[in-house]
Amino acid sequence: MPTNILMPALSPTMEKGNLAKWLKKEGDAVKAGDILAEIETDKATMEYEAVDEGVLAKILVPEGTADVPVNQPIAVLAAEGEDVKAAAAGAGKAVRSAPAPQPAQPAAAASAAPAPAKPQPAPPPGPGAVTRAAMHDQAPAAPRQNGHGRIFASPLARRLARDAGIDIARVAGSGPHGRVIARDVEHAKAGGGLRAPAGVPGIAVAIQAPSDDKIRALFEPGSYEVVPHDNIRKIIAQRLVQAKLTIPHFYLTVACTIDRLLAAREDINSTAPKGEDGKPSYKLSVNDFVIKAMGLALMRRPEANVTWTEGGMLRHHHANIGIAVAIQGGLITPVVRNVEEKSLITLSSEMKDFAARARARRLKPEEYSGGAAAISNLGMYGIEEFAAVINPPHATILAVGAGEQRAVVQDGKLAIATQMKITLSCDHRAVDGALGAELIAEIKRFIESPTAMLV
């Protein structure tokens, strides 16, 4: 019988995707493992492999189509020996559906089918004015319990809430019988549907943003154009709102003298062997040294190599660090793993590969997820100093400014030194002030004594 090919869920939180390109055309024979299409998620472009054999009878969603919901039929596959024309004529009515390369979670399917006669949650509000209302008047209804204090929630919703550091008991459920589902957690991550935490009775915080029409009314008609948000920009907006609403930030700044680092970098690069094309086999950057310094510092201060969750602190055994990479329309944070174990040359090679594939949107989901810390470097843009926003589930992010020659006092005399300011943003739930100060002091120590990274 004909088989529906469905839009796959390529990550646990994916609800829609863009069908970037078909690599097979109608009438083509298909074997298991063949690449059928390229699917764009919010972070990457991924290949969709066939899992069945047959003939591509009908393409239901043309390439270039945006925001195709997960599990929507995108094509029909006729089984071997079947009438291709008959299968195409019945497109979209196939009885069987092909499994996706990474099957959608049951909770995601549940979130796609709202329960009848149950009011739906308000759409996720954006940043704006903060209003307070009595809990019994305007707070979301409490999630249903089973009589033993356990909250009804899907496994996916629990995992998403845990990864985001959200107390599942504070999330309003919109599933059957008040069950908390994945959609509710995403709504909470965007700043909506969260009740006040226990111990703060009578207060609920709701975020209300002015409507698009009200904002546009502030500007003269014809003086602007509307550029629709792409998936990357939407996700960035949601996560920034989540970070500022749920993570109590504090910031620590120090100036690092990097003359010795620059000299070590120049010395190492000058000894790099040249390939057949005459180019050096590697070229270290200042950022490579910063990555290594932070990785070693996290090993020196393992109490800071953590992730906050409501149930307990996750203390990580390795330094897995996300590195912010600017891409068209936003940024992405590939994670360099086991930094403390890798040489500077290996780190440099990995980062060049990550950056190239990030800009081509070819990173795999596991390559930009996880990690307990991150680095954002705007020094190459001439930025002297800035404070970065923590990207959950990270507990810290290091903002790196430009290296500049400055007048400093050395041994009671004025001297010229190349200095670089770094600012550590910390999640105060996981990293206290003294611990954050110890961590940034270790980072500074390694940056100013680069040979310590080599032993």
Image (tube, helix red, strand yellow):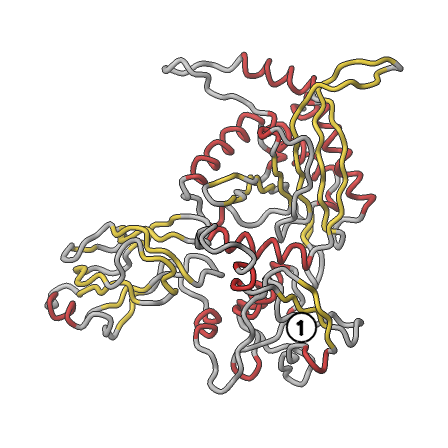
Evaluate whether residue 230 shows in this view.
no
Q: Please name the residue that numbered disc 1 is placed on.
A: 169
Residue name at image x 63 percent, y 83 percent: 146
Horizontal and vertical percent for residue 451?
Answer: 68, 21
Q: Nearer the viewer, residue 258 or 210?
A: 210
Q: Quadrant of the N terminus?
A: bottom left
Q: Where 423 sits versus 56, above or below? A: above
Q: Nearer the viewer, residue 104 or 202?
A: 202
Q: Answer left or right for 426 relative to 145.
A: right
Q: Where 273 sits versus 88, above or below? A: above
Q: Answer left or right for 303 relative to 57.
A: right
The amino acid pointed to by label 1 is Ala
Crowdedness of circle 1 by 10 Å Cα count: few (<14), some, many (20+)? Answer: many
**Secondary structure beneath disc 1?**
helix
Evaluate whether residue 79 shows in this view.
yes
Question: Which residue is farthest front?
Answer: 220
Horizontal and vertical percent for residue 242?
Answer: 62, 58
Question: Which residue is farthest right?
Answer: 412
Horizontal and vertical percent for residue 122?
Answer: 56, 73
Horizontal and vertical percent for residue 55?
Answer: 16, 60
Q: Where 221 sits versus 201, above or below? A: above
